Image (cartoon, rainbow, N blue to C red):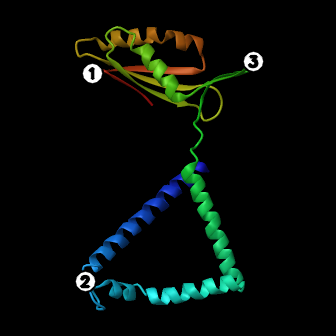
Amino acid sequence: MIVLLRALAHLVAFVLLSALAAAGLTVAVFSLGSGEGGFSIAGLARLAHLPELERLVGAFLAALEGGSVRSPALIGGTIAVLASLLLLLGALRRPAERLMVLDDGTSGRLAARPRALGQAVGALAETARRVTGSTVRVKPKRRGVGGRIEVTALHPPTAEPGDVEKRVGEALGSIVAGIRTLKVRTRTQTGGRGARAE
């Protein structure tokens, strides 16, 4: 729900900012003219029917001040306020980060943040000989315990990929053996130094 509201808030913000930029550009172009003619601020106001809008809004505000607003207007205003609050909630509230649940037993739940777990796995993978960097992708299960970790070990062109993959597997052996709910998949790739956890 929060993710949907966040996406909707971003879309509305983009549309409003685009409309504001277009309106500002239009006003800037029309401000180059002068007088009461067509190519001027006064002419732009007439094209946008601003005098009629001013009278309409003025009549509505006067009715609102006098307490004689009709029900449809009140319903529309209430809906607009609620929609604004929902968009504000989607823009300000961050979606909850999904945790990698490693164990869930009678003694309690053991969980880790995917990014932190990926950085730890990457650091272990880079302790293997001939590994110059790593890319780790952590994929928790949507429900239940465990998940998958994909490790890409970078190595120089002179290294044997099979040997590098074997050494990375040995370096990650403590994680695989200690946490049986994890499935760790390793592969090798020729590349330079650098590490990234996703």
User: Which corner quadrant holds the C terminus?
Assistant: top left
Asked whether disc 3 touches disc 1, contact meaning CB atoms under 8 Å apart, the reply is: no
Asked which quadrant contains residue 123, the reply is top left
**The residue tagged with tag 3: helix, strand or loop?**
loop
Residue 82 shows in the view: yes
Q: Position of residue 134 (x, y in %)?
A: 37, 21
- Name the amino acid, label 1: Gly
**At 31% from the left edge and 71% from the top edge, which residue is drawn?**
25
- Give coordinates of residue 101: x percent, y percent: 62, 26
Q: Secondary structure at mark 2?
A: loop
Above-or-below relation of 156 to 38? above
Q: Earlier in the sequence, mark 1 or mark 2?
A: 2
Extreme residue in the left direction = 158
Residue 47 to residue 3: above or below: below
| C-alpha separation, residue under disc 1 versus residue under disc 2 | 59 Å
Q: Which mark is residue 192?
A: 1
Q: Amino acid at mark 3?
A: Ser
Q: Where residue 107 is drawn, which disc sits there?
A: 3
For the residues bearing labels 1 and 2, Cβ distance under 8 angstroms: no
In the rendered image, residue 53, in percent from the top left (x then y), is placed at 50, 86
Report if the CB atoms under discs 3 and 2 are less than 8 Å apart. no
